[in-house]
Image: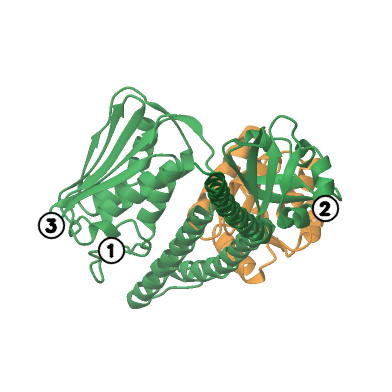
Amino acid sequence: MKEYEKNEEEIKRLRERIAAFEKSESEHKKIEEALKESEQRFRVIFDYANDGMLLTDIKSKKIYTANKTICQMLGYSLEELKKIDVNDMHPSHSNIAEARNIPVKRKDGTVFYADIKCSIPVILGGRTCVICIFRDITTQKKIDELKDEFIGTVSHELRSPLSIIKEGISLVLDEIPGKINEKQSKILKTAKSNVDRLARIINDLLDISKIESGGLKIKKEALDIISMMKQVVSSFKLAIKDKRLALKVDLPEKEIIVHVDPDMITQVISNLVDNAIRFTEKGHVEVSVKDREALIECSVSDTGIGISRDNLPKLFSKFQQFGRIAGLGRRGTGLGLSIVKGIIDLHGGKVGVESELGKGTKVTFILPKK
Amino acid sequence: MGKRKVLVVDDEIEFLELLRLRLEANNYDVVTALDGDDAVAKVKKEKPDAVLLDILMPGMDGLEVLRRIRQEDNKLPVFMLTAFSSKERVKLANEFNASGFILKTSDLQKEIANITRALEKHQANDI
């Protein structure tokens, strides 16, 4: 090969290498730009999120980085935050996955409450970190407190005049101020039974609002469900006799100890038996309890009017009253079964219903014994 | 047995007057007080056989009145009146040895019959 031809070859190779280099550099730049853009996008989201975020080194308990929101929440600058130990802020910080209503200390020593959610550990720059997200619930807590206070006040303010109306009517009905005739007595009895109904609605509304706001706390105690069932059923004996219904009781002979809130479960059984009697004109009401190892199964069934297939899914919703017969018997509030479901859910149990129109209804609930 | 004297304490004057009618019809002598201070004074002055005491009152509430009554007299039957019961209140009142609870919206004739029986038992135990 001639000398100049060799040089030409060399130049060509060099050109190709330069072109390849230029191409790789522009790709590099593109990647760099994409990275920068991604970092910027992340930063904007990170800093402007409504929730406070911290990236914490699990081992050293030091904060790796934090967003602007958490700096504002805590009153620290980012540099100050990086120097403090997370345990000073709240002791259980790195050991939680998700926790509600946790007290968190600010720089000035004051405390606010937050719901905290932490990620699974991730490796960043050779360090094992967790990302924790803090949601300040101060406003929510204040609203809940105001709501509870409002409900408490309203229920008292409603019940006080109600007690006066009821006692006024009762005094006249009992003929304490003087004799009344039969027509007057009938009118006053109607008025009185509706005052009672209003009182029941207020009680039920109060219960349902407590269940929905999470304000109803269960206080579990060990008790024998069989004797409780007997006690509740015996309080309905008169009502069952008044409607000339038969009462069937299918209970195991031995006691069964369950850990439940006694008042709440009494309310559940009462609501179910009350419903069964109210919607049954002939036949029987039956209560039964079955021991299912770690669970207990209780049911209340009747031979009443039943519920149509269409209405079954709506049964546990508020203010649903199916098959109410105009002018007959004591009216319900339409809240009884919502309360039943709320209480059983709180106990970690399940409630279900089987029903056939014109044949009867069976409501069953299952509760864990512990 | 002569008439028993009962002190009824409630800031709601209308409820107080209706309860007075009911108690008088049940053969009680009725003394009333509209607030906690008056109640504490009347327990000393009137020496009632029993007290019906509203829990929620402005100023000194029923639980505080009960606490003060108990400082002087641990045996006087005191029944708490309430528009609605709460577990916390029942617990507090039981700490001060309340004799019972009366829900204002319940059947008051039945409640008073229960109180009369409780007072008869109380007096029988005293003799």
In the rendered image, which residue does mark 3 sit on? A358
* Of the image marks 3 and 2, the number of the one nearer the N terminus: 2
> How many numbered badges does the structure rendering display?
3
Q: Where is residue B99 in the image (x, y as percent from the top left)?
A: 63, 43
Residue A213 visible: yes
- Residue B126 in the image: state x and y as whole percent: 67, 34
Chain under callout 2: A
x and y percent of residue A261 in the render?
48, 38
Specify which label sits upstream in the sequence, 2 or 1: 2
Please give the residue where the numbered disc 1 appears in the rendered image. Answer: A329
Tell me which chain appears orange: B
Which residue does the image show at 65% across and 59% down from the upper left? A40
Q: From the viewer's perspective, is the residue at label 2 or at label 1 nearer?
A: 2
Q: Do labels 2 and 1 share a chain?
A: yes
Q: Residue flagged by tag 2: what amino acid is it?
A: Ser
Distance Cα–Cα, label 2 vs label 1: 69 Å
- Furthest-top residue in this view: A254
Query: Label 1 is found on which chain of the structure?
Result: A
Q: Which mark is residue A77?
A: 2
Q: In which quarter of the image is the C terminus of chain A?
A: top left
Q: Do labels 3 and 2 share a chain?
A: yes
Closer to us: A131 or A190: A131
Q: Which residue is drawn at 21% across and 55% down?
A: A280
Label 3 with label 2: CB-CB less than 8 Å? no
The residue sitting at the front extreme is: A2
Question: Chain A, which colour?
Answer: green
Residue lying farthest to the right in this orientation: A108
The colour scheme applied to this rendered structure is by chain
Q: Is mark 1 on a helix, strand or loop?
A: loop
Distance between the Cα atoms at labels 3 and 2?
71 Å
Q: Is mark 3 on a helix, strand or loop?
A: loop
Mark 1 vs 3, N-terminal side = 1
